[in-house]
Image (cartoon, grey):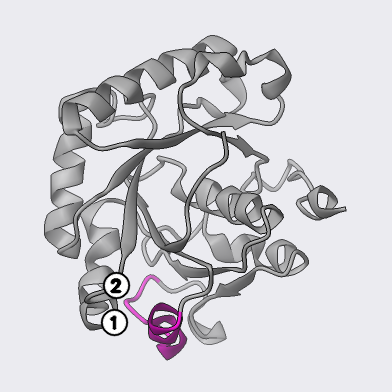
Amino acid sequence: MEIDLDGIVIIVGNYGSGKTEVCINLAVNRKMAGLEVRIADLDLVNPYFRTREAKTRLAELGIEVVVPPKQYMQADLPILSPVVAGMIRQPSQLTLLDMGGNDVGVNVLAALGDALSGRKIHVLQVVNPFRPFTDTAEGCLKIRNEIEMASRLSISGIIGNANLIDETTVEDIYTGYDFVSGLSKESGLPLKFVTVAAELMPEIDIKHFTCPVLLIERQLVPPWKRSISLASKMK
């Protein structure tokens, strides 16, 4: 099954849910499907794992990443480029907004209310059931409510991103899928897709899932590890 997303897609979630990694790989997936893709890096909370870290690799694929001005690249300040509002008013086939974690990180969306008003948008909550505060349905729904209150937007779908980084097993993927499937039913929100790390994909039974699967090729890695080349996917 192909991931069916276009228009303005806002990626939200709690700290450590893997929002940015999902955003980067979703951008590549949709670019490979032939869509024009742009990303706005609006993560003004986490100074380490941000979309901007993969900007050069994404640019090689023809994916534009809009980031704060150079002098503020490492600042955790609510500074937005006017280009972001322009991206929203004249979106590409897929315009991704990579937000910071929890309600604090999405406060900036309230400031973009005028630009977003009247537009069809998808606000997707990334859920990793192996992270604190999202290991129960109650925790996930609490974070959903906090994000919606802060952003003044309604979450419209769930992304399952079950992983324990390098310790992830196939069983963890299946367990995570069962969790977000249950969360989808309890919340009434559709499960848009789940993720699977590239190294685990050969062991995965794709028939286990009733939703699309996004292949994750990790880009945001510690300095002592090498990320997988995104450019090779387009050759």
Nearest the viewer among 18 and 63 is 63
In the rendered image, the quadrant that contains the N terminus is top right
Q: List the single residue furthest toward the top.
A: 171
Q: Is residue 90 above or below residue 25?
A: below
Residue that appears at 68% across and 23% down: 201
| Lateral position of residue 148 relative to residue 197, left or right | left
- Based on the picture, tell me whether residue 59 belongs to the magenta stretch: no
Image height check: is 1 above or below 176? below
Q: Which residue is mark 1?
A: 115
Magenta segment: 76-90
- Asked if disc 1 and disc 2 are in contact, CB closer than 8 Å, the reply is yes
Residue drawn at x 51%, y 25% is: 164
In the rendered image, residue 212, in percent from the top left (x then y), is placed at: 52, 33
Q: Is residue 105 above or below residue 210?
A: below
Q: Amino acid at mark 1?
A: Ala
Residue pictured at 67% horizontal, 53% vertical:
33
Residue 97: where, in percent of width, then height?
43, 65
Q: Amino acid at mark 2?
A: Arg
Q: Which residue, given by chain and number where applicable, does mark 2 sit on?
A: 119
Residue 84, position in %: x, y? Answer: 43, 81
Label 1: state its secondary structure.
helix
Are there few (<14), some (14-19), or many (20+) residues within 10 Å of tag 1? some
